[in-house]
Amino acid sequence: MEIKVLRNVMIKNNSVGKDNRELFINKKVFVANLVSSPGAGKTTLLENSISSLAAKYKVGVIEGDLYTSRDAERLEKFNIPIVQINTEGGCHLDARMVRGAINELNIDNVDVLFIENVGNLVCPSSFDLGEHKRILVYSITEGEDKPKKYSTMFSTADVVIINKVDLSKACKINIDQVENEIRSINKKALILKVSALEPNSLREWLLWLEGEIERVKKS
Amino acid sequence: MEIKVLRNVMIKNNSVGKDNRELFINKKVFVANLVSSPGAGKTTLLENSISSLAAKYKVGVIEGDLYTSRDAERLEKFNIPIVQINTEGGCHLDARMVRGAINELNIDNVDVLFIENVGNLVCPSSFDLGEHKRILVYSITEGEDKPKKYSTMFSTADVVIINKVDLSKACKINIDQVENEIRSINKKALILKVSALEPNSLREWLLWLEGEIERVKKS
């Protein structure tokens, strides 16, 4: 019975996710779903990405969190449309929540929509929100062994951003080993190494984003 | 329907959790449920705790992980009973899984049982495993804002171990602020500051553990 209900939930989610994706394609909005453990640096990455992108593109954000709106408050300074979803203890965003949030945003006026998921390296991996790309932010402070341990998340990511690389020595972490572990789980993902606090380290990420935004605009 | 099934799951879990607790009390085994985000340092804490405790007490471990047995392998050197639970993608341990693992361990021959939960700051908070105490390991690299964001986990912890305090300067994290945030969510928890890699920083934690083990032995 539990399994049957879970399967129904997934079928419903995937159906709404598909509808969301069609809407995003029709409206020519590039959508990125940011996933990670708690505190891996999704919001900091967003802050320093938006501050660079906002001059050229219209940015929108959907913020997912269990209870607070702290991340949304950190992005208020950009004066962009932000919708907060509070899951009230729920461990992931689903496609229906995102659908509700889209109705609050005027996506006719958005080129790129970032969805910041709940900080959780397990559950969000199973829920398609309709995004174009899934971006996994992985802090090197979490250790080398996590790709194999959280393999669903690592195998379903389109981009893996290895964050906080400036802390690798202090944490005694071998970044090459981290990269090899990720590659062993996911042969295709783009792997980038950044320190999200340092805007200079984000150049390759921002170039990739611009490429994707332009590709969706012209499609 | 989803909610009804979820409630049934929780009632069943709590009932088995209660049975587990009665068994642990009868057998005079002190049981600690270790929870955290991925990579916060549960296994390292266990390694350096067991190496100190094993001379005096009989230690057992139940290791929870989605797919791998890497954490269990790290503890093999202690030559203690370890049972690995793989949740196959599941986001938390439940009381029934623990019950099954207990049947594999000879707990008549154990003074202290550590249960290392799946690395996830959301879902494990709702599942009573029958433990005496819930220990939350929180890495300061995750930032100051997590206690309010993951308030169910922080409010249900008996002990909060702030780990990796040696990285606070490199991460620009104010440990006093972290402690205040935890205290605002949980007035009663014991809060300890450690660097799990440094055995010297674990003295207060080990003293607390010994006190709990002795209390359960004498009850």
Image (cartoon, coloured by chain):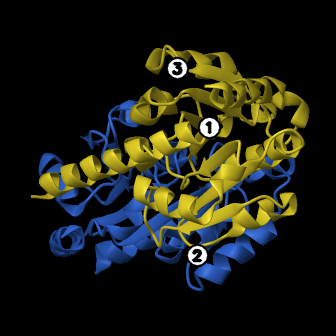
Chain colours: A yellow, B blue
Question: Height in image: B209 above or below A114?
Answer: below
Residue B63 coordinates in the image, percent (x, y): 33, 45
Can residue B96 be seen from the camera position used here? yes
**Residue identifier under label 1:** A28
- Is disc 1 placed on a helix, strand or loop? loop
Q: Nearer the viewer, residue A5 or B216?
A: A5
Q: CA distance from mark 2 to mark 3?
A: 36 Å
- First reached walking from the N terminus: tag 1 or tag 3: 1
Q: CA distance from mark 1 to mark 3?
A: 35 Å
Question: Height in image: B172 above or below B131?
Answer: above
| B147 left or right of A171 in image | left
Pointers 1 and 2 in contact (C-beta within 8 Å): no
Amino acid type of the residue that numbered disc 2 sits on in the rendered structure: Leu
Q: Nearer the viewer, residue B47 or B89?
A: B89
**Residue identifier under label 3:** A181
Q: Residue at x 60, y 50 (%)?
A: A115
**Residue identifier under label 2:** B190
- The quadrant where residue B148 appears: bottom right
- Is disc 3 placed on a helix, strand or loop? helix
Residue A44 coordinates in the image, percent (x, y): 77, 49
Chain bearing tag 1 is A
Q: CA distance from mark 1 to mark 2?
A: 52 Å
Amino acid type of the residue that numbered disc 3 sits on in the rendered structure: Glu
Residue A32 coordinates in the image, percent (x, y): 60, 40
Residue B30 coordinates in the image, percent (x, y): 33, 66
Q: Give the quadrant of the C terminus of chain A.
A: top right
Amino acid type of the residue that numbered disc 1 sits on in the rendered structure: Lys
| B126 left or right of B102 in image | right
